[in-house]
Image: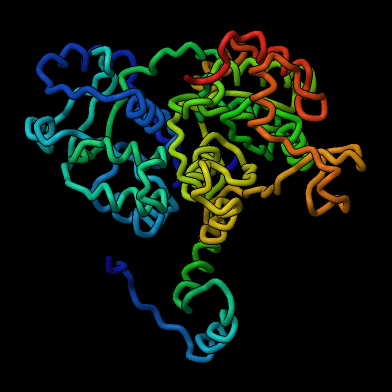
């Protein structure tokens, strides 16, 4: 199956540097290397945390107490 | 607290009012009977275990997962979550309409908002997910028995099914609130489908040394013949935790999910699921989610290299054994002694002893745990 991909531009010097870096590594191509690096970067920027309503939390805590998970 | 996969915890469990409305209208809806594994998938979608999925995958996500191990949004996802139907069943269901999903006893489970019906290749599904087409592989055998059409669309759960293990059943919302209540910031997940031996305990405690708490999460559901029964696994872990863990550092809850035995792909799936439960780390041991010799023993660890954006950190462990010379649990990286000094944590060996009514040596299994297992007349799946 054809991959659904887009083209972006990077400086030729950076491209060559990546090409050198990935020689003998598991990264098959410069594109793979860049995709991996960008995914890592985006994951670091992912918003942390979640919030539940006070009512939800209280209800859950009651169940957790009843089951013996919290005192 | 770590973000759920995709940023939002899915909650598609209908409240009581909506549930009554749906049930009242249910007579007019076309019905589809689904098996226990699909019921588990439905519940895992609706309660957020499979966040960000809102239902069964459509063709585009299905193909992307098979080929790229990612959803269309580029989010890591390695196991297709699909609902199969026969051509006859599919023919009477219309895209754009609701379908009432019932379990095998005829109890209404959920409403599927059917968006798409599509054909698929069983061979391709088996080969890409299980990396084999050998029908002796339990996952491949299951695929071979699947019906020809896949149904896709978001769903709404009417209510969570009762199980004999309800007191151990927590949703991701509940575990997240539990971890917060306990003040844990780093939580390591331990996936299991076995009773604990000393090697498991050692791995768990090593991981726990570097985290705030451990989440022991046995998989309950269809397993192979010869696997320990669910109730035996739970009773044995209860005993282990009671005698050998700090209450404020260990939590056990079940995960009702089919074991697919997809090795590396399933290891990623297990990590995503535990991230949704609020875990920051997951233990990945030797041949995680493997079966027989289908996967390289460390393939399930190597695959994590491909997912720098997973959002949960794997903790890799080698195989542990007891060294008579070291007089402790060790692995090949830390023990210089020859094989003759090693006592392996062989599941088969422990099982054979238990079947014969013999208590395994204390180097292999805690006597309290062995005693609990031996109290069951038939502790294994037949």
Q: Residue at coordinates 41% horizontally, 42% vertically from top-left? A: B137
Residue A42 is left or right of residue B93, and the answer is right
Task: Give B247 or B260, whichever is nearer the viewer.
Answer: B260
Occupied quadrant, residue B88: top left
Does A1 appear above or below B82?
below
Does B371 appear above or below A7?
above
Residue A67 is left or right of residue B62, and the answer is right
- Report the number of numbered marks: 0
Specify whether residue B281 is in view. Answer: no
Does B153 appear above or below B309?
above
The quarter of the image holding the N terminus of chain B is: top right
Q: Residue at coordinates 74% horizontally, 32% vertically from top-left? A: B201
Residue B270 is left or right of residue B56, and the answer is right
Occupied quadrant, residue B98: top left
Image coords of residue B20 (percent x, y): 25, 12
Q: Please name the colour scheme applied to the rendered image.
A: rainbow
Specify whether residue B8 is in view. Answer: yes
Task: Give B253 or B232, whichever is nearer the viewer.
Answer: B232
Occupied quadrant, residue B283: top right
Image coords of residue B333 (percent x, y): 80, 54
Q: Residue at coordinates 84% horizontally, 45% vertically from top-left? A: B340
Image coords of residue B220 (percent x, y): 49, 24
Q: Residue furthest bottom?
A: A13
Q: Residue at coordinates 74% horizontally, 28% vertically from top-left? A: B249
Image coords of residue B291 (percent x, y): 51, 41
């Amino acid at each position: 199956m054809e991959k659904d991909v887009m083209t972006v531009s990077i400086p030729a010097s950076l491209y060559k540097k990546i090409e050198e870096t990935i020689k003998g590594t598991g990264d098959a191509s410069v594109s793979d290397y860049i995709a991996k690096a960008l995914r890592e970067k985006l994951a670091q920027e992912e918003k942390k945390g979640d919030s539940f309503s006070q009512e939800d939390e209280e209800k859950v805590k009651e169940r957790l107490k009843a089951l013996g998970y919290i005192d | 607290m770590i973000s759920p996969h995709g940023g939002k915890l899915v909650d598609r469990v209908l409240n009581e009012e909506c549930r009554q409305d749906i049930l009242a209208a249910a007579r007019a809806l076309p019905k589809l009977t689904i098996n226990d594994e699909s019921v588990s998938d439905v519940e895992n979608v609706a309660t957020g275990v499979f966040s960000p999925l809102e239902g069964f995958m459509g063709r585009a996500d299905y193909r992307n997962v098979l080929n790229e191990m990612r959803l269309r949004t580029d989010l890591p996802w390695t196991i297709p979550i699909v609902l199969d139907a026969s051509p006859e069943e599919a023919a009477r269901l219309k895209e754009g309409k609701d379908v009432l999903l019932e379990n095998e006893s005829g109890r209404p489970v959920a409403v599927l908002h059917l968006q798409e019906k599509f054909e698929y290749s069983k061979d391709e599904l088996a080969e890409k997910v299980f990396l084999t087409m050998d029908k002796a592989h339990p996952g491949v055998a299951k695929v071979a028995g699947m019906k020809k059409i896949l149904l896709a669309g978001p769903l709404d759960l009417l209510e969570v099914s009762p199980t004999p293990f309800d007191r151990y059943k927590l949703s991701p919302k509940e575990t997240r609130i539990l971890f917060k209540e306990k003040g844990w910031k780093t939580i390591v997940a331990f996936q299991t489908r076995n009773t604990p031996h000393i090697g498991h305990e050692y791995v768990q405690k090593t991981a726990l040394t570097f985290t705030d708490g451990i989440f022991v999460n046995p998989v309950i559901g269809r397993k192979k013949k010869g696997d320990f029964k669910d109730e035996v696994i739970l009773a044995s872990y209860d005993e282990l935790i009671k005698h050998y863990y700090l209450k404020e550092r260990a939590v056990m809850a079940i995960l009702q999910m089919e074991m697919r035995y997809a090795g590396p792909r399933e290891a990623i799936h297990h990590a995503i699921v535990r991230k949704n439960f609020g875990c920051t780390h997951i233990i990945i041991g030797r041949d995680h989610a493997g079966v027989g010799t289908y996967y390289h023993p460390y393939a399930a660890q190597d695959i994590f290299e491909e997912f720098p954006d997973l959002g949960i950190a794997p903790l890799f462990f080698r195989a542990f054994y007891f060294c008579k010379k070291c007089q402790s649990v060790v692995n090949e990286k830390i023990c210089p002694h020859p094989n003759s000094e090693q006592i392996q944590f062989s599941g088969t060996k422990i099982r054979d002893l238990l079947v014969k009514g013999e208590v395994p040596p204390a180097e292999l299994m805690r006597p309290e745990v062995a005693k609990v297992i031996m109290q069951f007349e038939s502790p294994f799946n037949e």
